[in-house]
Image: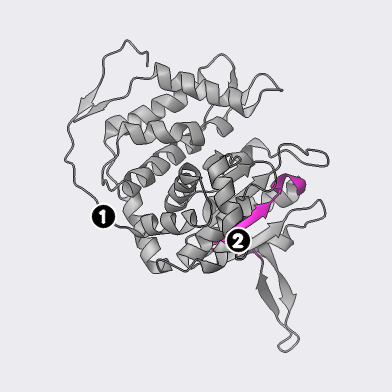
Amino acid sequence: MQADEQVEEAVIERAPGPASTPGSRIEDAVASVISGKAEEIRTVLTVLLAEGHVLLEDVPGVGKTQLARAFAAAVGGTVRRIQCTPDLLPSDITGMSVLDQGTGELRFQPGPVFANIVIADEINRASPKTQAALLECMAEGQVTVDGVTHRLPTPFLVVATQNPIDMEGTYALPEAQRDRFMVRLEVGYPDEAAELAMVQARETAQPLDAVRPVTTLDEFRADIAAAHAVRAHELVERYAVRLARATREHADVRLGASPRATLQLVRAAKARAHLLGRDWLSPDDVKALAAHVLPHHLVLHDPHARHEDARAVVAQALAGTVAPVMR
């Protein structure tokens, strides 16, 4: 849709959400560990409520693992870390059938993917075959071994990391793998005040050790259900679809945002609305998440294009697509 086209309007019934939710308490708890990263914390929490997955691409030492562990501690869930290496096997992630010496029968031994938050550290160092072992987990929330399907716990979030500097001996994530991630995020260096606060807080203690669960898994599952139940007017859904289609029509794009990306955008936007205490979806929610959700789904014609180039395409799509007016 071009910018000079008529703006669509819709009237919706607005109802305020609760003043305090499990999500807001989790956000505060994580902020006590990760200083100066309120937007990044809110984005990861949004993805967790939307039952998506996060790809963190940043240099070592900026708190990617701490961020994931803080979320797990605040939710009261389990967290497992997988250090990805070239010799890592798919069964090292999903688990395998082992012989029970007592009964003489095969017994399934769950792998580290059976946790609420799974950290796949340096995922691009694992072979493509091992990377593919995560596809079923991320898309369907289950693992199939020897023809038997095992459900993963809920909530279930994969936080994968990549180091954009040292790329020797790595395997680039294929489009099918990147498409499973709802958000690609850069944590970035903290500002001076936040870095000083981090140094002072960790001189004699580890703030992560002080984080206690601020909700139960059952309560948080209910919060996830409430985020899914946020009302989305058709005009807002159509706006998300038009944004995705605009990326496919861009001259610099060889492969635009997939329908899965569109669905992820709407789900993430609903989670954002819920965190802001609304039970209805606003076009502003879609706008706010588009820059995080859509760029990594794009494949540009230029093989040397950077993530910033894909973000520029999404920015142009946002500028050229008229948002409906909700009143």
Q: Secondary structure at mark 2?
A: strand
Q: Is residue 26 magenta?
A: no
The kind of residue on which mark 1 rests is: Ala
Residue depicted at x 38% and y 19%: 321
Residue depicted at x 46% and y 45%: 38
Residue 47, image x, y percentages: 47, 48
Camera-nearest residue between 321 and 138:
321
- The image shows residue 320, relative to residue 50, as above or below, that is above
Residue position marked by numbered label 2 in the rendering: 143
Range of magenta residues: 112-127
Residue depicted at x 16% and y 40%: 13
Residue 291, image x, y percentages: 48, 31
- The image shows residue 93, relative to residue 271, as above or below, that is below
Camera-nearest residue between 29 and 85:
29
Q: Is residue 115 magenta?
A: yes
Camera-nearest residue between 261 and 79:
79
Residue position marked by numbered label 1 in the rendering: 19
Q: Quadrant of the N terminus?
A: top left
